[in-house]
Amino acid sequence: MGRKEYIVEEVTKIMTNIENIRNIGIIAHVHHGKTTLTDSLLAKAGMIPRSSAGDLLYTNYEAVEKDRRMTVKSAYISLGYSQKGKDYIINLIDTPGHVDFGGDVTRAMRAVDGVVLVVDPVEGIMPQTETVLRQAMKEMAKPVLFVNKVDRLLNELRLTPEQTQQRLAELINNINKLIEDYAPEQFAQKWKVSVENGSVCFGSAMKRWAVSIDIMKEKKVSFKDVFAYTAAGNEAKLEEIAPVEETILPMIVKHLPSPKEAQQYRVPHMWHGELTTGDGKAMMETDASAKTNMVVFKVLYDPHSGEVAVCRVFSGVAKKGLEINVSGRQAKQRVQQVGLYMGPDKVIVDQIPAGNIAGLIGLKDPMVGDTLSENEIEPFEQITHYSKPVVTKAIEPKDPKDTTKLIEALRLMQKEDPTITVEINQETGEHLLSGMGELHLEIKETKLKDDFKIPIITSEPIVVYTETIETQTKDIVGKSPNKHSRFTINIEPVPEGIQKAIDEGHLSDGKPKGQFAIETFIKGGLDRQTAKGVVQIYGKNLLVDATHGVQYLNEVMELLIEGFKEALKDGPLAREKCSGIMVSITDATIHEDPVHRGPAQIIPAIRNAIYGALLINGIVLLEPKQNFMINIPQDTLSNVISFLQNRRGQITNVNQDREQVSITAKLPVSEVIKGFSNELRSLTQGRAIWYPEFAGYEKMPKELQAKIVREIRTRKGQPPEPPKPEQFLD
């Protein structure tokens, strides 16, 4: 039996002891040391030699990750660990830190109950540190803190012991402010981290040592000793006294909850079904003897097994032959095999009980966010991503014979990473791939070339805009081409509260379900009557039936929904998606004969009414923006500020720390994707470091809108000038 199979056998034995399981994510800003730390934890479990921990970067197993020494997707590993005669399982997810791959962090947070937040004390709290912590808090994953690279404070900043302690205390204080801001109310104080209770440790993952208050007491070392060894460059002695894994793993076991404890408060937070039912109680209790309920948080493609749905098992047991309902699908599906992930390897096992992470093989077309259940239950709340795809590239195969292969590869990539979107440009036949940023798309292109072996041609990056309205327009009438049916509509902006609820995943695309949706609409700003009349959510747009006693309306409602989606998928201004628009049907006259009210009549009638109303209203273009944190040498400050302002940047903060200056600025994505990096490097002699973060969509300046609209329309093969309302209304 190989070492890995032996480990898997040991792990599956312990899996049934729910108290001794910890599902955790390692989260941090890019290059703060997550994967290096993970190596040491794997060495402890006997999965890799201790001598190569920190260099091997075992969970960065894809070629592109090894080349860039950067995690671009989450890796899953179950490892065994013994402490004081007890055996534990740590189901660990090493997540990416770069903003472009933040979607992977969001999905991983659905699967875990706790996180180890890793922070570099020299860089401190970076934009992505805050984002990943916020994502963890949203999914109710409790944090502990590992301050990594503390040797940098001495070796690079030359701080004294007192200054070091002050710097660390300040950092912990700032982390706790974030926890207080983002944690669920009942945990805002309880989840704060502290040196005194052992939920904080310090060390160097690269040099493989770490200390916490518990380890210091146990090994009889003081902070001064740690400082002296580090200052003397004798970190080998620290590794001998306090290996990093001997500090981190006990902290995880002591401070992060078991599934049994965590599901008591996590299930009601993310599942809005009735908690007193058999399934509700089973999930609250993490009951492995009950019916099985799981949520898919990742879909991986395996060349041997096809698509693998990676799930958190909330109750029951994942096993071969299990018949399950998949949310939103008619037919039941059967699980063909169950696997346990060990980084790049998947090991087939008999079964995986509640409270663990399982890879399911054999499901047809699994999707991230799917609820899998033996009994039909209310689906779990959708997993929502903070960032939105803002950069697009047109992709086509060099050889037209590879077109089918490219379509299939793009479909699989979108399943693995739902933060990318793939569309076909009907005018040009090109495939449009949209992602979080240039790096995100670059990685996907590399995957197409290297993994799928498809030579491709790509366009320059294109920015994704959105169309919306700011005021109300009433009583616009759209007629069917045969003039036998007509629909009267009002349009107005969707209240901010509802747009926020959609962003946060409390409301999802499709027909709103149940009382929870109605109450969310009311809380977000609609009156009860309107809330009850919402028949469709599409993006951040709503279709409302505000009619009274109109004959045949129910019979054409599906066609009206189809026309509503068609209109808002391709707005009339620049053929970009619409967002934040509420369309209310207030009256209708519908022909009694079904022959005269088919798709060719009803869809154009509602679509044209919406187009006409939007153009009368004065539709506006929203552009995506990013927040940047830019670190530069002080002597380049005035040049960099001019450079940012020339690119329509808003400077929000300038902070000076000795010779370094940190600038926080908000810039339109359109000003960043062309030449930004090269020019900023050249202005700072290559010494600038910057981190972007998605900052939402904002209204484009009026003086620029007409020019940009013409450019987009020309690129899409449309007449340069937008249409007039009369073209849709007669």
Image (cartoon, rainbow, N blue to C red):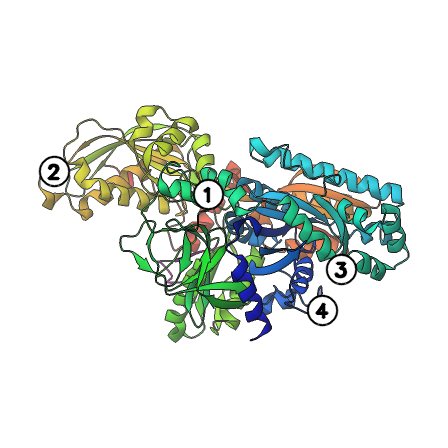
First of labels 1, 2 by sequence position: 1
Is the residue under label 1 in contact with that under label 4 (CB below 8 Å)?
A: no
Dot 1 lies on which element?
helix
> What x and y, as percent, mark residue 76?
55, 59
- Look at discs 4 and 2 and give the one toward the viewer: 4
How far apart are labels 1 and 2 at the CA level? 55 Å
How far apart are labels 4 and 1 at the CA level? 40 Å
Where does label 4 land, which residue?
52
- Vertical comparison of 564 with 66: above or below: above
- Classify the position of the N terminus by image quarter: bottom right
Disc sitting over residue 208 in the figure: 3
How far apart are labels 4 and 3 at the CA level? 11 Å
Mark 3: amino acid = Arg
Mark 4: amino acid = Ser
- Vertical comparison of 20 with 510: above or below: below
Disc 2 packing (10 Å; few <14; some 14–19; many ≥20): some
Where does label 1 land, which residue?
285
For the residue pair 420 and 28, the one nearer the viewer reads as 28
> What x and y, as percent, mark residue 137?
57, 40
First of labels 4, 2 by sequence position: 4
Disc 1 packing (10 Å; few <14; some 14–19; many ≥20): many
Where does label 2 land, which residue?
591
